[in-house]
Image: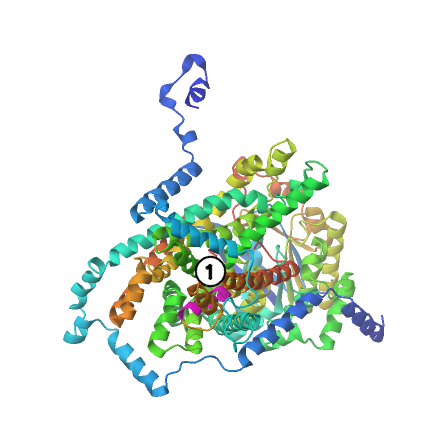
Amino acid sequence: MNVTHERPDTFKLESAGRNYENISALNPTTISIKQGERVAIVGPSGSGKTTLLSLCNSTVLASSGKVTVLGNELGETSGKTLKKIRSKIATIPQNLALVDSLRVWQNIITGQIGCRGFLGNLIDLIFPSKNKILQIYSILERLGIEEKLFATTSNLSGGQKQRVALARAIYQNPQAILADEPVSSVDPARAENLVQLLNQISEEENITLIMSLHNLELAKAHFPRLIGLRNGEVQFDSNPANLNENKFKELYTLSDREILDDGKC
Amino acid sequence: MIEKFLMMGNANNINFNKFPIEQIFSRRRKVLITIASVAIVCSFLIGLNPVRLLNGNNLKLAGEFIGAAFTPALDYENPVPGTEPFLITVIESVLMTLRFALLAMSVSIPIGALLAFFSTTAWWPKVRNKRGLKLLLIGTLIISKSWITFARSIHELMWGILFITAMGISTTAAIIAVSIPFSGILAKIYSEIIEEHSREAQELFQSIGAGFFSSFCLGIIPQALPDLLSYTFYRLECALRTATVFGFIGIETIGYRIKLSSDEFHYHEVWTYLYVLFGSIAMLEWWSRSIRKRLGGSAN
Amino acid sequence: MTPANRLLRIKELHQSRSKSLFLRFSLGFAILSLAWAWSAGTLHESVLSKEQRGTNLEKFIGKIIPDPTRESGQWIDSLPWITNLLTEGQGLKATGITFGLATVAITISGFFALLLLPLSARNFGTQRPLEIIQGKNILRSLYWFAINKSSRVLFLFTRSLPEYVLGFLLISILGPDPWVLVLALAIHNFGILGRLGSELVENNSSGSARIMLAQGGGRYSSFISTILPDSFNRMLVYFFYRWETCIRESTVLGMLGIVSLGYLINDAKAGRDFDRMLAFILLGALIVIIGDIISSLVRHKLRITRSE
């Protein structure tokens, strides 16, 4: 672990919080994540994991505090700079957000939609260059679904769609990947496979990886840094080796009230 | 039925205060009964008296008309030497009807798409501080929606009569007249279809840096395309019917021929025209169904 | 894999991808027919010369402003003229008749379409409704096939006849009478409601109809007790959508001779009273807008968004 040289911050939250109509989804938090770090966010449903990710990829604005992404404070940037920053952050949302009627390669090529204007994107979708197809094919090869290059996305299984969404994120050539529960509806073997793959890619390319997970074991096994959330509050933020079992149990023990309320967001 | 209700429940404790009105007059039944009663009241107000129609002369004509259904004409009933064969006239008038419909649609679709774009909020970028932009967007929305409502509320035949009265019988004028309401209804339905579809892909594209137009076009349109296409086919079918009706105000489509033949009581000819019209719509329906099957997409 | 191999593999995949010949053919056909429509010779134009048309247009535009306003220059002065339109000019009566015609017609077509629905749905009107076999007789299956196809054809045929054409023909046979217009509207909408309804029945996925049939219920009983309540809301939406369209049509059908708005419009046009004509047209528009509002309210209450 040679962290001797200073690594820039990819994400920095300073007392950043988010409310929805007076209900706090995320209490003011201070976190900083450096370039190339791999972080897993764990916690029960409704604890604010998605909100945290949304603050990082600028989908939602912080109601309080400051969020700085790649050196730019989100509240203050707009226009071209904001677009540029956004194009460097890839997201894999829980619902995958794929366009089912397009072919697999078309879905992946939209990964770089932020880098070209409308006409350029249209051309990419109809007359893609050979190089781009080759790149996409190689990415799919790595993920094991290269056969599906020209398949229609609606005909794919859930696990295959997940990998297409992942391929799209990789094709984007981002500096950070934010994955929101990417393996919650996938069987354990495949889940292990995907999480490992994401970690590998992140290490190889020095991409910051933030993943929210349900499965504690998976998180403990693969990530050097765990952030535990509960009711919008950060309970712990450190290496799993330094945390004992009690901390984890506390995180997931729901009071009766919480079971009835069924989480918040 | 009422006794059965009374007998339900504890025989010793029949509580007359708990008469199950709700069960007899459930919501659905209430709706049906309301509709039926309103209809009956209306029919009295209009002075409906169907029996009045069943007099001798009418019945004879009706019988002739229905009888002619089984033997549609293949030639003029009173052929005038020198005119072109009947079947050729039939084919020509169908082609003219088709042409009218196609021309009207090819004008209405682009205008409708443009209007639809301006009357939906699906592509609006999330502007926080620019009040001027927001006002402009809302302004265009209101203008387009009002125009659409107005254009739609005047029947296309009325638009046709307006234009023809002003400019004389002219097929071009008629086509322009038809595109006004048609572009309006296309715009309304297109915008509804667009708003019905999920915005997930569009939001994702925005979050990775795409502009509002790219994320709208590439995130929503590909999903909505089957439904948009399906409705456009339905409109084409309506356009065929409208083209037919315009024949009655002077445009030379199949309706014009129907009017001519009917005025001379040549009911066999009329039925030929009706069958041909039916055939064209049936073919359009078959084509539209086959396309929809192969495209997939949601209901309808 | 070497780059060359990769390219080869990509080419192979590209060749074997799923594509629909029919769709491509359809696209080509559509483009061709549009090209034909735009280029196939001249359209029938008016026999009047350009100057004549010009003067016609001027005269028309001049006359569309109501007489009293033209004389005094104030819109307020037209108020008595407008009220006259509505009372003596039978404007209000025509409005009432328009609404009435539409309501009666749509109720009749709804009723009859409902009767035929179970027979016309593809998965219901067969010998094996929803795959519950009712016997293995070849004659019976042919019988059901015939019934299903003929009810579908009936819907298709009545649907393809425009209300105006139907109205015209029926009036020429039966004479001008509001009942005839109701019949014309009802027949056409019977076809449309039938088609919309049979799609609803076909797309119904609740499975309770299957259970009814499996327990020995007849087609109509299962239909009325399961599918009908299930799709009631949607059917109501279609009903009101067609009601609104009927209102639109009956403003026009009056041109065939019954005292509804269409008749008044035609009357004004013949008398070259363009101001009255425009006023009645706008009145018709108002009626349609009111119908649209009522229909939207109903749809909103039933909470289904798509209108057409």
**Residue C276 horizontal/vertical position (percent):** 25, 67
Give the answer, above or below, for where C134 lies relative to B158.
above
Instruction: Name the side, left or right, on which B44 lies relative to A169.
Output: left
Colour scheme = rainbow
Q: Amino acid at mark 1?
A: Pro
B78 vs A260, nearest the viewer? B78
- Tell me if residue A7 comes above or below residue C198 in the rendering: below
Could one spot residue B236 in this view of the protein?
yes
Q: Is residue C304 above or below residue A104?
A: above
Query: Magenta region's main secondary structure?
Result: helix
Q: Quadrant of the C terminus of chain B?
A: bottom right
Residue B242 in magenta? yes
Q: Which residues are magenta?
A: B239-249
Q: Name the residue beneath numbered marker 1.
A: C162
Callout 1: SS: loop
| Horizontal side of residue A73 vs B29, given as left or right | right
- Between B241 and C168, the one lying in front of the other is C168
**Residue pictured at 45% horizontal, 48% vertical:** C109
The answer to whether residue B143 shows anywhere in this view is: no
Badge 1 density bin: few <14, some 14–19, many ≥20, Cα 10 Å: many
Q: Is residue B133 magenta?
A: no
